[in-house]
């Protein structure tokens, strides 16, 4: 067991290292990051040489990569190309808003999708289940960015003019605002981000529950004459939650890749919006750092899900 | 062992998540019908899939015939009719340059629809071949190819796509290609799993024993049993690709104006959203409608092609 965990961890670390090299290379395809300085006649050749040395651009690419990744491992993500600061100081303030947004979306998903999925499985093909199936198809087919625009239009603009007071804000987030103010800003992006995962997880939970409901040990439990409640809640639900929890762990890994679009639509000051911002500014060192963080999160949560699953499910072999 | 996100295919399964029973059992009860007839009969029962398929066909025909049926040119400005709401002349209204929105929705759809279909085709080809090879040959080939799939799957999909979009300006062709290169592993994984379970079936072993060549076994005995699941996955990929392309174009890193695409039209509508609602609603509704039709079609096909289904 321990050997399995260790092996998986080492393997994940190697994959991450490989991913870092690929990410570094992909971003380097952007070409010379100092082009805008070279084109500026007021920048002297000495200054240019200084900048080239500062960013280490005079070294061959493999050396640049080596320096970048060793710095990264010691917690230094490099220097920004567009601002005179470190990437660390640009990225740091963006972490909390993304965690807040993803956390609320996750909470909404769990609170709605799991009970509804279980209900749908227990009342298979009931009116509510069928409505859920249809709505989840609509959810799957909904582009998040457009849903965001519509929410801004309907719950932001129309509702405000109808009610006479502003209930939801359509963009941004104030750092000095109180709890209510944060909620007013958070509500719409959190809803936009949750729709697809609610659709996905409620269907997934339904399938998992149905799978358990048709199993032999559940028939045994019923045959023993156990009360319905105990059969469903103790025997069925606990087992049916397992795949969902695993999928949730994996979903966490997609944390800001998934939030790029929503954060941009709502100008939410998180990591996803920062990525788009850095691309518009050609600040490829920031983009590089964000890509690597994104890959690391995916790999880490995959590992967590994997290991957790092998712990929880005695049927999974780990050799 | 679960080490990757489950695709939507899994989510739709009605409690059929475990390994299946003998595959062809259900067919024994029906006499005198060919496989095709059985599949068609099952598909016909799925009303939403039929409707989805028909609407989708209509959308694709409209996209093909756009130069003929579009009432105006997509870059034709009529400065006497700027920012007009829907009317008889302009059923979807006009934008701030007096361009007819219906015409632009038609032209914009061509890009998204081509990207969707293109990605579906590429992913099926790459994923199908890689999955077949890796599942059939096993051992080292499998280790290498499965490693490659795992690797592509851990790359943060959308961020990588956006970075590439900002470095190279995407055309409809390049964005198709890049999305396909990032999306194929899930298809390969599904095909691989299916091939693995077929490879050890008696009829394949029998064919091997009498000396049938590998290529012939792959195409005659294995592939026909994988096609169903590939078709279903391909429809999901088409819908996914359309949503991805529109999102990337919306963020300004995909298809660039003046070529209209549903994504960049919506980006364009952003600033005037509160006054010119039609510019925000129509392209978006078209995306939803298209993706919804594809997903319904996929769902119908899944039910129809499922070998475990009982009449």
Image (cartoon, rainbow, N blue to C red):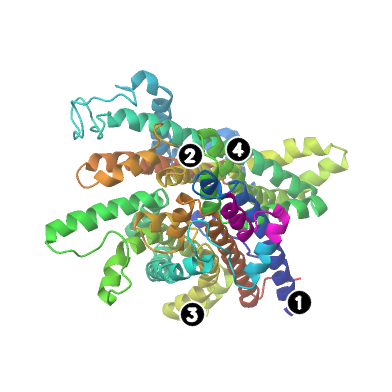
Residue range corresponding to the magenta coloring = A45-66
Inspect this view and state whether residue B228 appears.
no
- Write down the residue under mark 2: B43
Residue A64 in magenta stretch: yes
- Write down the residue under mark 4: B122
Place of residue B93 in the rendered image (x, y in percent of width and height, measured from the top left): 23, 33
| Circle 4 SS class | helix
Instruction: Name the mark on residue A234.
Output: 3
Residue at 30%, 59% in the rendered image? A171
The N terminus of chain B lies in quadrant: bottom right
Q: In 3D space, how far apart are the residues under numbered discs 2 and 1 (Cα atoms)?
A: 49 Å
Q: In 3D space, how far apart are the residues under numbered discs 1 and 3 (Cα atoms)?
A: 32 Å
Have a look at marks 1 and 4 and say if they share a chain: no
> Who comes first in sequence, dot 4 or dot 2?
2
Residues tagged 2 and 1 counted as in contact (Cβ below 8 A): no
Place of residue B120 in the rendered image (x, y in percent of width and height, measured from the top left): 55, 39
Residues tagged 4 and 2 counted as in contact (Cβ below 8 A): no
Disc 2: which chain?
Answer: B
Residue at 40%, 61% in the rendered image? A198
Q: In 3D space, how far apart are the residues under numbered discs 3 and 4 (Cα atoms)?
A: 46 Å
> Who comes first in sequence, dot 1 or dot 3?
1
| Circle 2 SS class | helix
């Amino acid at each position: 067991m321990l050997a399995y965990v260790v092996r998986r961890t080492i393997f994940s670390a190697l994959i991450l290292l490989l991913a870092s090299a690929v990410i570094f290379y992909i971003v380097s395809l952007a070409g010379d990051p100092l082009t805008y300085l070279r084109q500026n006649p007021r920048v002297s050749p000495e200054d240019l040489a200084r900048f080239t040395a500062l960013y280490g651009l005079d070294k061959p690419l493999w050396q640049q990569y080596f320096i970048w990744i060793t710095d990264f491992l010691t917690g230094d993500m490099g220097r920004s190309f567009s601002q005179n600061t470190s990437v660390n100081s640009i990225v740091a303030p963006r972490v909390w808003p993304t965690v807040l947004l993803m956390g609320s979306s996750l909470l909404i998903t769990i609170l709605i999708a799991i009970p509804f999925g279980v209900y749908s499985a227990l009342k298979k093909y009931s009116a509510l289940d069928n409505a859920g199936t249809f709505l989840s198809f609509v959810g799957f087919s909904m582009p998040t960015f457009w849903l965001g625009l519509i929410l801004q239009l309907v719950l932001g603009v129309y509702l405000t003019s109808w009610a006479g007071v502003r209930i939801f804000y359509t963009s941004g987030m104030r750092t000095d605002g109180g709890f209510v103010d944060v909620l007013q800003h958070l509500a719409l992006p959190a809803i936009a981000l949750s729709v697809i995962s609610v659709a996905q997880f409620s269907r997934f939970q339904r399938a998992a529950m149905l799978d358990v409901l048709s199993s032999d040990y559940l028939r045994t439990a019923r045959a023993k004459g156990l009360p319905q409640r105990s059969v469903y809640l103790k025997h069925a639900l606990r087992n049916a939650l397992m795949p969902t929890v695993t999928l949730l762990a994996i979903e966490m890994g997609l944390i800001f890749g998934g939030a790029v679009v929503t954060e941009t639509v709502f100008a939410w000051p998180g990591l996803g919006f920062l990525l788009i911002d850095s691309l518009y500014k050609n600040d490829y060192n920031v983009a590089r750092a964000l890509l690597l963080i994104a890959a690391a999160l995916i790999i880490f949560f995959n590992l967590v899900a994997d290991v957790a699953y092998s712990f929880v499910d005695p049927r999974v072999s780990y050799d | 062992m679960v080490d990757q996100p489950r695709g939507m295919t899994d989510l739709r399964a009605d409690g059929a998540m475990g390994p299946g029973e003998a595959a062809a059992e259900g067919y024994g009860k029906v006499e005198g019908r060919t496989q095709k007839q059985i599949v068609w009969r099952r598909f016909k029962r799925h009303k939403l899939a039929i409707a989805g398929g028909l609407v989708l066909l209509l959308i694709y025909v409209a996209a093909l015939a756009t130069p003929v049926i579009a009432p105006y040119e997509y870059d034709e400005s009529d400065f006497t009719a700027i920012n007009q709401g829907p009317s008889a002349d302009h059923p979807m209204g006009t934008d701030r340059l007096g361009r007819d929105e219906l015409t632009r929705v038609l032209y914009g759809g061509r890009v998204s629809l081509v990207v969707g279909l293109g990605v579906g085709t590429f992913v099926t080809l790459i994923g199908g071949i890689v999955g077949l090879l890796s599942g059939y040959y096993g051992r080292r080939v499998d280790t290498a190819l499965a490693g490659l799939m795992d690797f592509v799957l851990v790359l943060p999909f959308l961020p990588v796509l956006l970075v590439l979009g900002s470095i190279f300006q995407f055309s409809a062709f390049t964005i198709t290609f890049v999305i396909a290169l990032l999306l194929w592993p899930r298809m390969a994984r599904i095909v691989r799993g299916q091939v693995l379970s077929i490879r050890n079936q008696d009829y394949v072993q029998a064919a091997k024993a009498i000396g049938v060549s590998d290529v012939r076994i792959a195409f005659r005995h294995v592939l026909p049993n994988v096609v169903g699941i590939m078709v279903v996955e391909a429809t999901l990929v088409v819908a996914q690709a359309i949503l991805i392309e529109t999102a990337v174009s919306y963020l300004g890193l995909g298809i660039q104006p003046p070529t209209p695409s549903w994504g960049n039209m919506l980006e364009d509508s952003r600033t005037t959203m509160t006054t010119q609602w039609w510019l925000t609603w129509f392209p978006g509704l078209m995306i939803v409608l298209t993706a919804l039709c594809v997903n319904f079609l996929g769902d119908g096909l899944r039910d129809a092609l499922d070998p475990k289904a009982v009449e």
